[in-house]
Amino acid sequence: MIPEWAKEMNCAVTVCDKEGVILYMNDKAKETFAKHGDLIGKSLIPCHNENSRAIIAKLLETGGTNAYTIQKNGLKKMIYQTAWKENGEVEGLVEISMVIPEEMPHYIR
């Protein structure tokens, strides 16, 4: 389903279906969540708090996007979550999590 280009990317890529069942995790995502075991085929819903569950539900309902930054284990990360579709219908979500520098240039083009 997911092309191999995502497998060794230097950011975590996780894909779930519209029920929140994890379909794919690239190497970095598997490494990030290794302490939880193999998560493919399991629901990501129980791993999230009430607020996050509401965001997930809204993204699945609207086909929207959610982006934010976090600080975790001394690393600043950008989280980008967006719906994936087939024939215009929402089929699930993709999350890309990447480490970003503490200070980052911003350009207006």
Image (cartoon, rainbow, N blue to C red):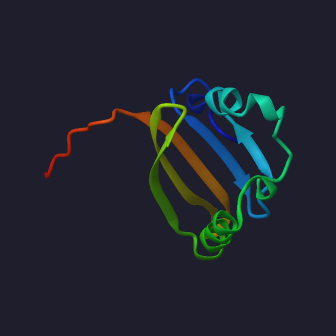
**Residue 101 position by quadrant:** top left
User: In the rendering, at what x and y percent does residue 93 appear?
Assistant: 64, 57
**Between residues 96 and 83, which one lies in front from this camera angle?**
96
Residue 53 against residue 108 in the figure, above or below = below
Residue 60 against residue 107 in the figure, above or below = below
The residue depicted at 66 percent of the width and 26 percent of the height is 27
**Residue 96 position by quadrant:** top right
In the picture, measured across the screen, residue 101 lies left or right of residue 73, that is: left
User: In the rendering, at what x and y percent does residue 83 appear?
Assistant: 59, 61
In the picture, measured across the screen, residue 99 lies left or right of residue 60, that is: left
**Between residues 16 and 70, which one lies in front from this camera angle?**
70
Residue 102 against residue 17 in the figure, above or below = above
Work out which quarter of the rendered image holds the N terminus and state it.
top right
Q: How many marks?
A: 0
The residue depicted at 62 percent of the width and 62 percent of the height is 85
The residue depicted at 20 percent of the width and 39 percent of the height is 105
Extreme-left residue of the structure = 109
User: In the rendering, at what x and y percent does residue 15 appear?
Assistant: 68, 48
Extreme-front residue of the structure = 74
